Amino acid sequence: MSEHDDNNPENDPQLANKIKDSARQIWLAGLGAYTKAEEDAGKFFDRLVQEGEQLETRTRGVVEKQIRTVEDRVGEVRERATGTWDKLEYMFDQRVSGALRRLGIHRREEIDALERRIEALEGELQRLRGRAPASDEEE
């Protein structure tokens, strides 16, 4: 037998052409599948966006209503808390002022009034003694 047997499939040019054609068809089918998948993915994405927009439109009113309700409730609670805080602060101020008065400690306004009276009396005393009132720099 010869080394090159004509019955050997490796030497059959028709078989080689069939394999080449099959390989090319497989390659083209793969490209077609890739292109189709890419087109379908784009359409699928667009459909998802469209459905998302529809859902957003339907739910926007409901969500905005819920947000307004929550904001109204927060405002009411804030008003109540502020009012309560103001009352508490006023009561605290009254109690502290009362305690300071009982201890003989005067409020700032009272001390300021006393200082003004003292300055007026000092001025009057100096006038009566015949001297001009002392300036702030001499003190």
Image (cartoon, rainbow, N blue to C red):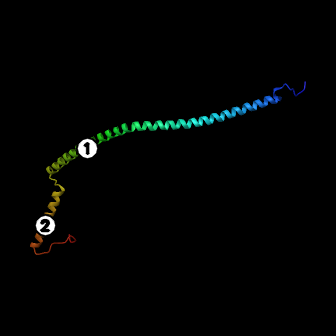
Image coordinates for residue 44, horizontal then vertical, percent: 53, 35
> Which quarter of the figure has residue 84?
top left
Near-viewer residue (102 or 11): 11
Above or below for 115 versus 31: below
Q: Residue furthest right?
A: 1
Image coordinates for residue 128, horizontal then vertical, percent: 9, 72
**Regarding mark 2 in the picture, which secondary structure is present there?**
helix
Give the spatial CA distance, label 1 vs label 2.
47 Å
Badge number at residue 79: 1
Badge number at residue 45: none
Q: Residue furthest left?
A: 128
**Would you call the spot at circle 1 few (<14 residues within 10 Å), some (14-19), or many (20 or more)?**
few
Residue at the disc numbered 2: 120
Q: Residue at x 19, y 48 (%)?
A: 93
> Which quarter of the figure has residue 72?
top left
Location of the N terminus by quadrant is top right
**Would you call the spot at circle 2 few (<14 residues within 10 Å), some (14-19), or many (20 or more)?**
few
Q: Residue at x 39, y 36 (%)?
A: 59
Q: Is residue 114 left or right of residue 6?
A: left
- Marked residue nearer the N-terminal end (1 or 2): 1
Image coordinates for residue 80, horizontal then vertical, percent: 24, 42
Near-viewer residue (80 or 42): 42
Badge 2 amino acid: Ala
Q: Is residue 79 left or right of residue 52?
A: left
Near-viewer residue (12 or 101): 12
**Regarding mark 1 in the picture, which secondary structure is present there?**
helix
Q: Kindly check if marks 1 and 2 are in contact, taking CB atoms under 8 A apart as contact.
A: no
Location of the C terminus by quadrant is bottom left
